[in-house]
Image (cartoon, rainbow, N blue to C red):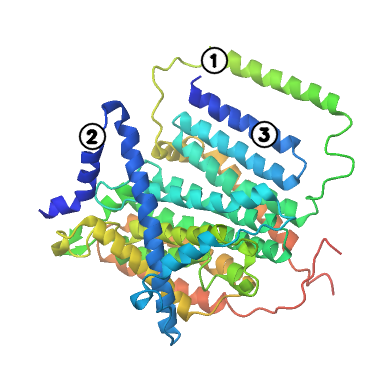
């Protein structure tokens, strides 16, 4: 019975597809999955906006939206109606075509990332051998949309915000990829389905998730930092926060286009949390062997929402990083540490199962963290900048 | 030569043409990105998954961003007063036609030389990795050296001149 519940969406889709003639079936099957994704994740997005506003409010000792429906549940409906009916203002000197395309490119690129996430047993939209590579390739396209938005607005603040956002996203993309490469090295495959399968084993009832290994924990922390920076979330939200005075690269966007940017940012958060769940937290596998009867998609989405709650918690707790602190952090701490994690992962594999791999790898990682964090991030002298070739 | 191939080919060529013919430099950069995307789609059509996704990741995700940054940080977005085409366009056309002729001859002559394969070989990423570390390790190391040199050069250009400007 629980196996039926686990595969209920797959069976529903098969029965729906059976109503169509055979030649149409592949197209209809893909179409149904795509429609489900397009309906489900914006619904989660609506839920997350309420969660975030209430959560942040409680952290900041206030209440948050409570007028629209009980506990403000209908707030996203109100927000949606507002953004649909607002006037769409485009500055007269703005670059029309690029201004229009920027939010579209963002949302399309982010939606495509959901195609490879395994949301449950047999519940991946497209099973690709190079699924992880596809995900990162599509994620790299979102930076282009940020630049397009900032540049086409013909606004100095937008341009500045866009350039900072792109610099930040590029800097943190390298640690993001490197921490995933450690997982790929251990699993031996770029396919996300195989990565989840490799973590779906249990020893003494505890799972083999990669986060429970020393390199996995360190890799997960680096991945989480890089993911927070990639999606421009606090404490890395200088591009859109600094300019909370002037709103950064989406200053000149109003109405539905701004809602699309908002949607794109939250969906990027979902998809990167989904990837982190797949890589480090075991995807759709249950935390304890005894809990295997609970459907796999429930575990995936619980882990996803847990990651979102951690994102919201971080936003409410930590102060914002300045641009130079952000970049220093990326290049001088996160990237070297991620390279070290890669080497420690190789050492883990090389030492083979036993107590040695645990002790040596943990010791190296902890010692390196202390050494790098204490010495590498000492406050440097910040004086007026001298440009070598521009004087 | 299926319909899908023609669609992607038209997209690539249109993007490349737009990159040369448009007046606004940033529009040219974005059209070049469309051409890169078209190339990636062609790779994917030929079942070269790794090459296609690496094309998107590297070209669209890094090279296109680099191009637009270069345009932004210099004053390249102002259209020059004399127009964007040079006066010696005929010489350029002849040279481009010559290069194209050489490429076309090389490609068409090589079709008979390659072994006739019955089906497209299934190349997995693992095989690419094996070949990179095994047979092509020297080019891999040379490319790594080149990238390191570029990185060091970038750091030197951006470095503070505290020692010399005293």
Residue A215 position in % (x across, y down):
37, 64
In contact (CB < 8 Å): disc 3 and disc 1: no
Distance from disc 2 to disc 1, alpha carbons, whole Å, reads 46 Å
The foreground one among A140 and B103 is: A140
The foreground one among B114 and B39 is: B39
Residue B106 sits above or below residue B135 on the image: above
Question: Residue at the spot x=51%, y=40% of the render?
Answer: B137
Q: Secondary structure at mark 1?
A: loop
Q: Secondary structure at mark 2?
A: loop
Question: Can the viewer see residue B145?
Answer: yes
In contact (CB < 8 Å): disc 3 and disc 2: no
Q: Residues within 10 Å of mark 2 (few under 14, many from 20)?
A: few
Q: Quadrant of residue A304?
A: bottom left
Q: Which residue is mark 2?
A: A19
Q: Residues within 10 Å of mark 1 (few under 14, many from 20)?
A: few
- Residue at mark 3 shares a chain with residue at mark 1: yes
Q: How many marks?
A: 3
Tag 3, which chain? B
Q: Which residue is mark 3?
A: B16
Residue that sits furthest to the top in the current view: B112
The foreground one among A309 and A370 is: A309
Tag 2, which chain? A
Of the two numbered discs 3 and 1 in the rendering, the one whose residue sits closer to the viewer: 3
Of the two numbered discs 3 and 2 in the rendering, the one whose residue sits closer to the viewer: 2
Residue A66 sits above or below residue A361 on the image: below
Distance from disc 3 to disc 2, alpha carbons, whole Å, reads 44 Å
Question: Residue at the spot x=40%, y=45% of the render?
Answer: A131
Q: Secondary structure at mark 3?
A: helix
In contact (CB < 8 Å): disc 2 and disc 1: no
- Residue at mark 3 shares a chain with residue at mark 2: no
Residue A91 position in % (x across, y down):
70, 58
């Amino acid at each position: 019975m629980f196996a039926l519940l686990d595969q209920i969406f797959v069976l529903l889709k098969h029965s729906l597809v059976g109503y169509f003639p055979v030649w149409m079936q592949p197209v209809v099957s893909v179409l149904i999955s795509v429609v489900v994704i397009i309906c489900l994740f914006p619904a989660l997005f609506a839920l997350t906006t309420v969660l975030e506003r209430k959560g942040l409010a409680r952290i900041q000792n206030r209440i948050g939206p409570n007028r629209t429906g009980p506990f403000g549940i209908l707030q996203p409906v109100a927000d949606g109606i507002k953004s649909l009916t607002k006037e769409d203002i485009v500055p007269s000197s703005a670059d029309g075509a690029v201004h229009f395309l920027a939010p579209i490119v963002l949302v399309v690129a982010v939606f495509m990332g959901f195609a490879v996430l395994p949301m449950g047993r047999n519940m991946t939209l497209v099973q690709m051998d190079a699924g992880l590579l596809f995900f990162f390739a599509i994620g790299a396209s979102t930076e282009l949309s940020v630049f397009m938005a900032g540049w086409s607005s013909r606004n100095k603040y937008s341009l500045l915000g866009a350039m900072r956002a792109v610099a930040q996203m590029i800097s943190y993309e390298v640690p993001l990829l490197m921490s995933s490469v450690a997982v790929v090295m251990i699993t031996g495959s770029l396919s996300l389905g195989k990565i989840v399968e490799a973590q779906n084993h249990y020893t003494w009832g505890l799972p083999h998730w990669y986060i429970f290994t020393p390199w996995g924990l360190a890799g997960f922390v680096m991945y989480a930092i890089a993911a927070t920076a990639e999606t421009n979330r606090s404490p890395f939200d200088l591009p859109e926060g600094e300019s909370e005075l002037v709103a950064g690269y989406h200053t000149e966007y109003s109405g539905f286009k701004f809602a699309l940017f908002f949607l794109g940012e939250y969906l990027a958060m979902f998809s990167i949390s989904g990837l982190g769940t797949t890589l480090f937290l075991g995807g759709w596998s249950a935390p304890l062997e005894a809990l295997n009867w609970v459907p796999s998609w429930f575990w995936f989405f619980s882990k996803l929402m847990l990651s979102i709650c951690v994102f919201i918690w971080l936003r409410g707790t930590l102060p914002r990083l300045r641009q130079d602190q952000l970049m220093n952090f990326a290049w001088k701490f996160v990237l070297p540490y991620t390279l070290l994690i890669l080497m420690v992962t190789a050492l883990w594999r090389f030492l083979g199962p036993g107590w040695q791999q645990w002790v040596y790898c943990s010791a190296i990682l902890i010692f390196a963290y202390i050494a790098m964090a204490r010495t590498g991030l000492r406050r440097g002298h910040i004086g007026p900048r001298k440009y070598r070739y521009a004087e | 030569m299926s319909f899908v191939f023609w669609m992607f080919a038209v997209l690539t060529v249109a993007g490349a043409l737009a990159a040369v013919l448009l007046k606004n430099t940033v529009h040219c950069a974005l059209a070049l990105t469309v051409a890169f995307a078209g190339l990636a789609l062609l790779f994917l059509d030929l079942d070269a998954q790794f090459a296609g996704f690496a094309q998107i990741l590297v070209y669209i995700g890094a090279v296109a961003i680099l191009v637009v940054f270069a345009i932004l940080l210099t004053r390249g977005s102002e259209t020059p007063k004399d127009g964007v085409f040079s006066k010696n366009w005929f010489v350029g056309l002849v040279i481009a036609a010559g290069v194209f002729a050489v490429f076309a001859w090389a490609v068409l002559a090589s079709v008979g030389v390659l072994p006739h394969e019955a089906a497209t070989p299934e190349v997995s990423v693992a095989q690419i990795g094996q070949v990179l570390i095994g047979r092509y390790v020297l080019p891999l190391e040379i490319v790594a050296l080149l990238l390191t040199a570029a990185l060091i050069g970038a750091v030197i250009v951006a470095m503070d001149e505290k020692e010399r400007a005293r």
